[in-house]
Amino acid sequence: MSTQLQVYPWQQDNWRQLHGYIEQQRLPQALLFSGAAGQGKRHLAGYYARTLLCQAPLADASACGHCIACKLFDAQTHPDFVTIEPDEPGKAIGIDKIRQLIVKLALKPQYDDAYRVVIIQPADALNTASANAFLKCLEEPTERTCLLLISEQPSRLPATIRSRCQKIDCLTPDHELAMTWLRQQRVGEQADLLLTLAQGSPLLAQQYAELNMIQLRQQYFDAWLQVAQGKENLLTVAELWQKQEKIDLAVVLRWMASWIADIVKCAYRAESPALSNPDLKNALQALAERLELKSLYRFYDNVLTTKSQLNTQLNKQLMVEQLLISWSQLNRH
């Protein structure tokens, strides 16, 4: 977890809300931090947790960074700070983890007159059994315990859990504010395009820069075009995409959905600023001039459906193969 001793510039309103809870000594028992990837939800929740655990908070109620509690937190060894997450990304949070949490919460905090803080990320990874078990923590709260849930898809949480949480909406920052921050992080001249690809999320844009994501996306787009032109074996492409460890398949499908949306926009003569992939406009425009819109809409729906099924037991390579087969057939009409 980041030990940065301040919230990000675009989180000031969120921090004012959280600081207000501390100042008024009216801490919600459960908070739900929601928003798109790359907004810094985990950092904000961690900053709040660190503040609650600090033994010598500053005048603005933020953590001092020097007391034993802050040092334990930074070392990830604080006995009153618990993190619940899946064993592997994309997996569910099983009921055993929640049962262990319930046992721990039944005990008093290690430090007298201090808070105990639990972070659950992603909270929407709770399966039916673990969500029902966790509901007991909300219905029968233990003393001086704060539960912080983090989710990019809060609608996937049961309404019984959502209704018992105060909401912290982490919104996409203003474009100029995000660009200023990216320049301060020495993200290069492609910062604007990276921010566009990251759908306005600055931390995701920074990560994309570190991963050379623009070049990687170009490679995937070129392969996608070659499948359309019959110049590349779609089964080989599907296998490579499914096995690629550097790029998550969900990212590839999000790119694909954005390419299709841009083709539709190009069909209606949209200008580059309106596109999600402005640097690919010429190729997208060429596709728009020869593809049927109705078929594109159907294919777009297929991409979104496939993306929603990635965390199921369905064969991912087969799913990608079927998508590329549909894309290939679409280009033959």
Image: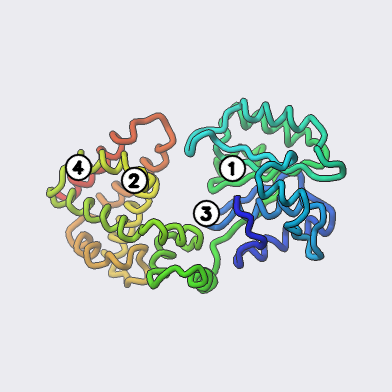
Q: CA distance from mark 1 to mark 3?
A: 13 Å
**Left or right of residue 81, residue 38 in this image:** left
Give the residue type that dot 1 points to: Gln
Residue 103: quarter of image: top right
Above or below: residue 34 compared with residue 104 = below
Q: Secondary structure at mark 1?
A: loop
Give the residue type that dot 2 points to: Val
Q: CA distance from mark 2 to mark 1?
A: 26 Å
Mark 2 against mark 4, which lies toward the viewer? Answer: 4
Residue 261: quarter of image: bottom left
Q: Name the residue tied to disc 2.
A: 303
Q: Nearer the viewer, residue 8 or 31?
A: 8
Q: Secondary structure at mark 3?
A: loop
Q: Secondary structure at mark 2?
A: helix
Mark 2 against mark 1, which lies toward the viewer? Answer: 1
The first of marks 2 and 3 along the sequence is: 3
Give the residue type that dot 3 points to: Ala
Give the residue type that dot 4 points to: Leu
Q: CA distance from mark 2 to mark 4?
A: 16 Å
Task: Please rate how many residues cluster around mark 2, counting C-alpha atoms within 10 Å: few if below 14, some from 14 to 19, many from 20.
Answer: many
